Each structure stands twice: as C-alpha cells, then as structure tokens.
Image (cartoon, rainbow, N blue to C red):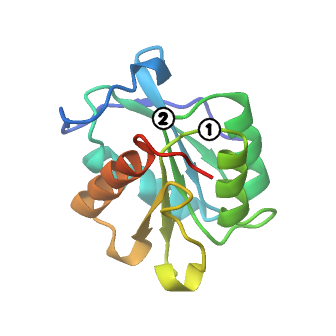
Amino acid sequence: MESEPQPTQPETAASELPSVASKVAGDYFDVLIVDDNLIDRELDREQLKSAWPFEVPFAADFAANGEEAIEKISRRPFVLVLLDWSLPRANGGQVLRSIRQAGYRTPVVVVSSMNQEAIGENLERLGAAFLNKNKMNTESLREAILSSLRLLQNRPVL
C-alpha cells in the first residue's frame, strides 16, 4: 500500500499556463503516476520534480496497474496523470479511454519505452501527449505536460 502523498516543491513555474486552481486540494496539486515498475514510478517522480511547470507544488500518488489507476481517478481529481502504456490488469489505452469516457479532462502524458507508432492509438485525439521514456529529461517532460494542456484547451475529447 502506498503512503500518503507528500507535496514536492517545484523548481520552476510557467506563468502562461491556464488556471487550474479549481483542482488544488489544499496547498498542492495531486498527480497520479501509473507504472507497474516501482523504480520507473520513482524515476518519473524525480523527473517531475525538475520539470514541474506550476508554482503550486505537487503531491504524487501511484498506481501499479491499470485497474488501480482507474479506481483512483474515479475517487478524486488529479491535475495530471503520467501513464505507462504497458500495464497489467488494464493497459494504458484502456485507462486513457476510461478517463475520457467518464468525462474527465485531466491532462495525460503517456510515458512509454515503446515508440508512439507502436502504440497504435491516436493519442492527440484522446487529449494525451506522448513522451518516450528513454528520451525523458526535464525539458521534454515539461514540454509534454504543456502539450497535454494545449490538447485539452477548447476542444472536445472523445
């Protein structure tokens, strides 16, 4: 069982981002990191600390499989979801479609070691940005977060 999410202070801020203050739970934003590999979940959180584009810090929560992610997303709002594509008990595509079919406009960044072409989904149509895990760094993750926000602005998802 995961421990209570702990807020993480950002190193940078992006003033051009749209307001997401309605999703603030207390003094931090909730972020869900979905990956079946514990080490990758921790690495994603560490990368996110450097790439976080908001002034409000984030608190990371974790899901180790697709079913757990869907359940957590249905219980509380997240301001961002980092989603691995290859997951047990509901793959990334099933999780992403579940998010959109439920009407959630949560920004999603699919983080996978697969190439985007191998995923075989139109991620942009589903309002999600893609980032190859092997090419992740502070700048590429920040850009993927901003891209996921832009994909959801003024456009219906599904």
The amino acid at mark 2 is: Val
Estimate the x, y position of residue 145 in percent, counting from the top left.
36, 51
- Within 10 Å of disc 1 (Cα), the crowding (few <14, some 14-19, many 20+) is some
Task: Describe residue 85's horizontal placement relative to residue 148 as left or right.
Answer: right
Q: If you read the primary sequence from the N terminus, does the residue marked by circle 2 or circle 1 appear first?
A: 2
Which of 30 and 79 lies nearest the eye of the viewer? Answer: 79
Helix, strand or loop at label 1? It is: loop
The amino acid at mark 1 is: Tyr
Which residue corresponds to the image point at 48% horizontal and 62% vertical from the top-left? 124
Which residue corresponds to the image point at 53% horizontal and 61% vertical from the top-left? 125
Residue linked to disc 2: 79
Label 2 vs label 1, nearer the camera: 1
Helix, strand or loop at label 2? It is: loop
Which residue corresponds to the image point at 65% horizontal and 64% vertical from the top-left? 92
Estimate the x, y position of residue 40 in percent, counting from the top left.
51, 63
Q: Based on the displayed image, in which of its 4 quarters is residue 17 positioned?
A: top left
Which residue corresponds to the image point at 40% horizontal and 16% vertical from the top-left? 27
Estimate the x, y position of residue 29 in percent, counting from the top left.
44, 28
Residue linked to disc 1: 104
